[in-house]
Image (tube, grey):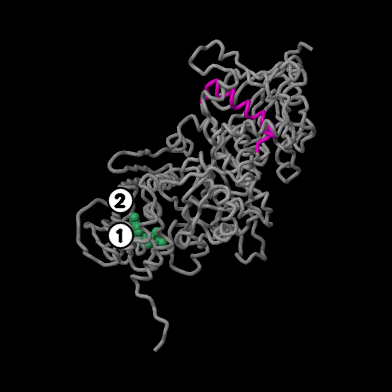
Amino acid sequence: MSKIRVLPEALANKIAAGEVVERPASVVKELLENSLDAGALSLEIDVESGGRRLIRIQDDGEGMTPDDALLAFERHATSKLQRADDLMEIATLGFRGEALPSIASVSRLLLETRHESREAGTSVEINGSRLAGVKEIARSRGTTLTVRDLFFNVPARKKFLRSDSTELGHVVNFVTQYALAHPEGRFALRSAGSEVFNLQPVPVQRERVFQVFGGALLKQLVEVQSDVPVFYTAEDEAGEPGGHSDSIRVHGFVSKPEVHKLNRNSLYFFVNRRMVRDRIILHALNEAYRNILPAGIFPVVLLFVEMPLREVDVNVHPSKTEVRFRHQALLHDFLRDSVRKALMDARPQTPFPAARHAQSAMGDSPFDTSPNEELAFPGTAPRASSWAAAVPVSGEVALPERSFALIPPTPAPTNATLPFRSENALTISAGTSAGAAPSEILSASSSAVVAGVLPAHSLATSAGVPASGESAEPVLVAQSQFGIVPLGQIDNSFIVAADGGALLLIDQHVAHERILFEKVLRQRSEGKVESQRLLLPLIIEINPRQQVILENITPELAACGFEVEPFGRKTVAIKAAPAGLATTDVQQLLGELLEGLERETQAISLGRLREKIAASVACHAAIKINMHLEHPKMLWLIDELQRTQYPMSCPHGRPIVLRYEKNEILKAFKRI
Ligand code: ADP
Ligand code: MG
């Protein structure tokens, strides 16, 4: 008697469902792809309870004949592939013939369809792989698929689903992505009967972007449009050139450097209109934005890459979101250069006279190079990489010297107590602790501050400032203990301040980040980390590599206030986290931390690990940009910042304070 048995089909389908159907949104994705493959131009999507209870997609595509309607649920039944060779050039979104049987095996499914060539339609009902009924029905051309009670027969899976709103968020995300890729289609999405969006067909992508994101974001986007020829030589196994288009094209939008996203959620990539997650593209973008965006900050990107079908292998993963490119390096460099060029072309041509920026007290920064090379965006490093040839980096650009954009020096962290005060301010200010040693200052300040919470009154009052609301006058002139007067905010993000002889611009987020970073590290070394128990454990999914990393760092995480335990095969439960972090931040933080460590090629020291954890905690607990700060809070922030060891740069190396000396201002006004 043989030990090996062929799995019954229903079981095989359930196993396949494990890969294809991760959550309601993956069902939506597969069904949308089927509808688009069927040539649908009108897609209506209804969900209830984030898709757990109900997902219904109605399309006006070609529909199915009665035979096909039944065949569609057989494993590996597809109308999209005929010969093995077809696998080399897949033009449809689907091709594996797995989606429908997989979904049917883990839900109660109803298919209603009518093929354009038939008078009557068909309905097929299936409950967890079991055929429950086939009927002839009357209906319009097209297909309606209704999926109820997803995972009703897979309790383990069901448990891992997140809240309805989280699941709905994923659904919205997928529908949005396909809507972006298909401006010619109508996409209506409703949740529990109320409309999430209803996008009418539009002739150009730009208008779809407007429909989805609105005009404000569109203004911040730069259009990308270029192509590169690919030549097939005689030796090439794929053979003759010609036939179809022999070029790779990219079009879409990328955001200007001012747009800062804290996560990757606004990166959309499509290859031949298939939504993909791809490391090559991500890396190319990263390169394009290098030194334009700080590390850990992401742009908004919508890139549509069109290439000959044979250039890309889409049969890499059951969910079909991963692809393999035949000419990876070519594509990578092409995308990097295209995006970079679009960004360069769109950079501001400031009409202001140049004001030379004073060298910072930090000394030479690696990014402080000759003026001509710094024309682009603040912090842009000169890079003699391949894009230099395509982009007029110097000479051809009309900007005189440096712009009034006042390019910040990128300071290396330097141990200094009060480097952003001018020399003379030192003598004027009579701040109580100005003369104290840094260590004393640190310990004096540490007791009163709670991570993530900006006290509105207590600290400001202790600095001799009346709490806000008591009287407007004194608040306006109140200065920090170190003689710095906050004047207000720009865009609710940057504090404008003055001290005796200079204008200061302070990035409120990174300032707070620096304060918290040092505080977390200090608490860690004193073994006094404040931890909070989460109401409900947070479950996050991790890959095997991350699992290994996590095991290694669990003791250190514990010492930093995290309680993380394995939970199931691919998931961990976070039960406690450092105080001051919002629950949503905790999840993101740990994900980012693991991703970051995954990218490390060499083992890192314990000290470095501690710093990484502290930097992540600080980044997530810090006040964000786009947040209004009352005067006492600004004052508090400035005071606390001054008490840090490295007040000039954040843990990731970004500048915190830009300082403009009176001399520079006088020069800019041509007074000297
Ligand atoms: P695949 O998309 O990989 O071919 P699926 O299991 O998703 O596999 O679908 C099986 C087949 O059912 C498809 O090849 C297609 O012929 C048919 N089909 C599925 N959905 C639709 C639809 N909305 N309209 C028309 N035909 C459909
Ligand atoms: Mg399909």
Q: Amino acid at mark 2?
A: Arg
* Magenta region: 628-650
- For disc 1, the neighbor class at 10 Å (few under 14, some 14 to 19, many from 20) is some
Asked where in the image residue 343 lies, by quadrant, the reply is top right
Q: For the residues marked 1 and 2, what is the alpha-carbon distance in whole angstroms?
A: 17 Å
Look at the picture and state if 299 lies above or below 37: above
Asked where in the image residue 193 lies, by quadrant, the reply is top left
Please say whether residue 507 is one of the residues in the magenta stretch. no
Q: Amino acid at mark 1?
A: Phe
Can residue 267 be seen here?
Answer: no
Q: Which residue is mark 1?
A: 152
Q: What residue lies at 36% left-to-right and 50% top-to-bottom?
A: 40
Looking at the figure, which quarter contains the C terminus?
top right
- For disc 2, the neighbor class at 10 Å (few under 14, some 14 to 19, many from 20) is many
- The x, y position of residue 167, in whole percent, is 39, 48
Asked if marks 1 and 2 touch (Cβ < 8 Å), the reply is no
Q: What residue lies at 46% left-to-right and 35% top-to-bottom?
A: 213
Q: Which residue is mark 2?
A: 56
Nearest the eye: 449 or 58: 449
Q: Is residue 362 left or right of residue 556?
A: right
